[in-house]
Image: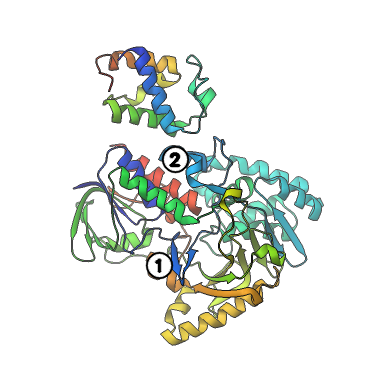
Amino acid sequence: MTPAEIRNEILDILEDIAPDEDLSGLKDEVAFRDQLELDSMDFLDIVMELRKRHRVQIPEESYGELASMQSTVTYLEPLMKDLQKA
Amino acid sequence: MYDTIIIGAGMSGLAAGIRLTHFDQRVCILERHYTIGGLNSFYRLRGRDYDVGLHAVTNFTPKGTKQGPLARVLKQLRFRWDDFALSPQIGSSIRFPDVELDFGNGLELLCQEIEAKFPAQVDNFQRLLEKLIEYNDLDQAAFESSAREVLCETITDPLLIEMILCPLMWYGNARENDMDYGQFCIMFRSIFMEGLSRPFAGVRLILKNLVRRFRELGGELKLRSGVRQIRSEDGRVVGVELDDGTLVEGRNVLSSAGQVETLRLCDDITDVDDRNTGQLSFVESVSVLDCEPKQLGHDRTIVFYNDSERFHWQVPKDELCDIRTGVICSPNNFAYDAGDGCLPDGVMRVTSIANHRKWSELAENDYELEKLRWYDQVMESAVRYVPDFRKHIVDTDMFTPKTIRRFTFHDNGAVYGAKEKVFDGTTHLKNLFLCGTDQGFVGIIGSIVSGISIANQHCLRN
């Protein structure tokens, strides 16, 4: 997957977790927490969705890497670059 | 072999089932009754639909609200706000002799009413609100401290204390007389700071949404499948035995049967300490009217009444019911969408405190007679606080603690579960967990939160 495809996947997961959120104005460099009202349960869900959809395992000590879209894509790129987009 | 076996197809069991199947677990929900819902169910009688349990969905927050239990439930279960189709209340009232406090969703109206009726308490009430905000950080000891004591430290008019406690105890207090302070905070938030609502179609809409989703995700729901025994080996559950002798194996078991009720099912315990079972149960007298309550001059959604200055929250000792206090719910009086139209009938539901043991000891004939006798007494009590609707009654039904026991299998027909809550849901068996009323959450949204949080904490991590 390319970084752009990974970004789309994350958007898809966010849409799934928070279907009433408007994600069109999401700023990649700003923390999710500051624009989306995500709590710790939601972050856990992002991790779980990545595991469910792509078999990507994220260890607990790396959860901090998922703070913003930019940091998430950067973190996931090496883990997902060999995956084919479904 | 299932990943998780869930006992009970009520709100908490179904919510847990959705979480677990969503993350690819093999899940089976076992329900002893022939229908879903548990303490929040529905039935049809003589051509009409009735709700059990739900008067109102508490914790209501408007569409777009991003915080609070309702928003969390929707996100965790991947529902849209519109899926629950909640319409807000019109307005409710706490009615004591000579004083009435109206409240709506959000604190504004309640604050105005306190200013008008208890002007000397305005600052004290503000202090109480400031105190309440910190409730999320309560440890177990602080949670279990006395709500009455905290109220006495802040509010100096005893009547206002009783009036604040009345609706909160009615909608979720498993203890007699006093209330856990933590439970008080949860109820205060869910009723006064957030608010009351109802789907036009009643509780069945929420339940049907939950079941449909659970099945779409591949979950199995087995009705008429009561669990007779929870089988264990070396401190772990290995499976459950159904009433018909079938064995079902699972890696985890999640039970919404109640704390004491669940322990009684375990094959490694012979003598269950049942001092913790809940006692508080109710009769509900339902009256179908030939007109809307509004046409009789009654526009309140819920009226919580109490006929003396002191609010008595205890199981009646010598009588079948205690009708000094009660709750009157008018399902017609919600602000439904114009497109919904009106409910087919006017309905007044009156709930009173009742003694399960006394009701269950009655012989069949006496039971029917007592139902009729108490229906009349409940009406007599209720019409002191709302316009007399008795001439407009076209049909009635009544359920008692015995009915609740029969369909939910909770000891004493207890509606709000055990007195001492098991917050983390753990038991003496490593892979047996509790969810539902005995976990400290009550109400529709609370029960759903309970199922979600126990599934997340104990069944999804491995």
Q: Residue at x 36, y 45 (%)?
A: B213
Residue identifier under label 1: B411
Q: Residue B332: percent from the left, percent from the top?
A: 60, 59
Determine whether, in the image, residue B233 is placed left or right of residue B33: left
Spatial CA span between label 2 and label 1: 33 Å
What's under tag 2, amino acid-wise?
A: Phe
Disc 2, SS: loop
- Percent x, y for residue B88? 60, 49
Check disc 1 and report its element: helix, strand or loop.
helix
Whether residue B337 is visible here, answered yes or no, is: no
> Of the residues under marks 2 and 1, which one precedes in the sequence?
2
Colouring scheme, one of rainbow, by chain, secondary structure, one colour? rainbow
Toward which corner of the image does residue B353 lie, by quadrant?
Answer: bottom right
- Residue situated in front as seen by the camera: B48 or B271: B48
- Give the letter of the chain under mark 2: B
> Camera-side residue: B170 or B328?
B328
Which residue is located at x 65 percent, y 71 percent? B382
Q: Nearer the viewer, residue B88 or A46?
A: B88
Query: Dot 1 falls on which chain?
Result: B
